[in-house]
Image (cartoon, helix red, strand yellow):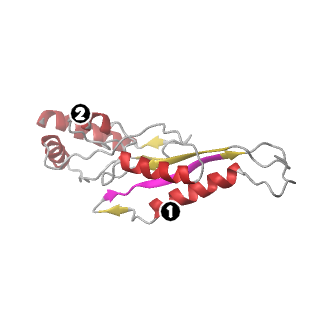
Amino acid sequence: MHSGLINIEDNAINKMTNFIKKIQRVFTNQPIKVNKIPQTSCRLLYLKGGEDIFYKIPDFCESNLDIRISPLDNAEKILKQVQAIADENAVEINVFKKCNSSVTSENKKIVKALISSIKETGFSEQIGYALPTCDAHWFSEIGIPTINGLGAKGDNIHAPNEFIEISSLKEIEKIHFNLIKIW
């Protein structure tokens, strides 16, 4: 539609940005962590709309939102919230991956063995939570206690200059070896 037609305004970018603003308001009111547990968050990763024509009102817009769901929330509940906001704004959504976060109790045998292994190797343990971006949820959903995040230290995750510290890799090797002996 030509932008000179002032009475007709069906701008796909406006619809999408209204949708994104409402979605982000739902999640930005929550604290980052509660008792060490990460809260549900939403990040805009991609936005594209319209054509390379200066006088045409955009008739399409697409975006990618990365919603990380806290162990305190439920993926179905969050998806229903997002769908309701999408419906209000005439936005169609496609879900690429939907899963809950996983939590393994510190009382589970595997966690206790890991803590012992870490202490015996002289390193300090940090027990926390992982959001559903790892593979832990596949195992926890079928009842297998799973530990996530026991990897080497490094920086620049998913960037061209991503790296791990060799000394850290050796520490993790000791912890894993000791865990196997304890287990």
Type of amino acid under label 1: Arg
Q: Position of residue 56 (x, y in %)?
A: 82, 47
Viewer-proximal residue among 158 and 100: 100
Residue sitting at x 72%, y 51%: 11
Mark-to-mark CA distance, 2 and 1: 34 Å
Q: Position of residue 62 (x, y in %)?
A: 63, 43
Q: Which residue is mark 1?
A: 25
Residue 105 is marked as none
| 105 lies left or right of 171 | left
For the C terminus, the image quarter is: top left
Q: Nearer the viewer, mark 2 or mark 1?
A: 1
Type of amino acid under label 2: Ile
Inspect this view and state whether residue 131 appears: no
Inspect this view and state whether residue 97 appears: yes
> Sequence order check: which comes first, mark 2 or mark 1?
1
Residue contact at pointers 2 and 1, CB within 8 angstroms:
no
Q: Mainly helix, strand or loop, the magenta region?
A: strand
Look at the numbered disc 2 and give the secondary structure of its residue.
loop
Residue sitting at x 27%, y 34%: 139
Q: Position of residue 74 (x, y in %)?
A: 33, 49
| 84 lies left or right of 21 | left
| 74 lies left or right of 97 | left
Residue sitting at x 16%, y 40%: 110
The quarter of the displayed image where residue 22 is located: bottom right
Residue sitting at x 51%, y 41%: 158
128 drawn magenta: no
Q: Which residue is mark 2?
A: 142
Label 1 environment density (alpha carbons within 10 Å; few <14, some 14–19, many ≥20):
few
Label 2 environment density (alpha carbons within 10 Å; few <14, some 14–19, many ≥20):
few
The span shown in magenta is 37-47
The quarter of the displayed image where residue 49 is located: top right
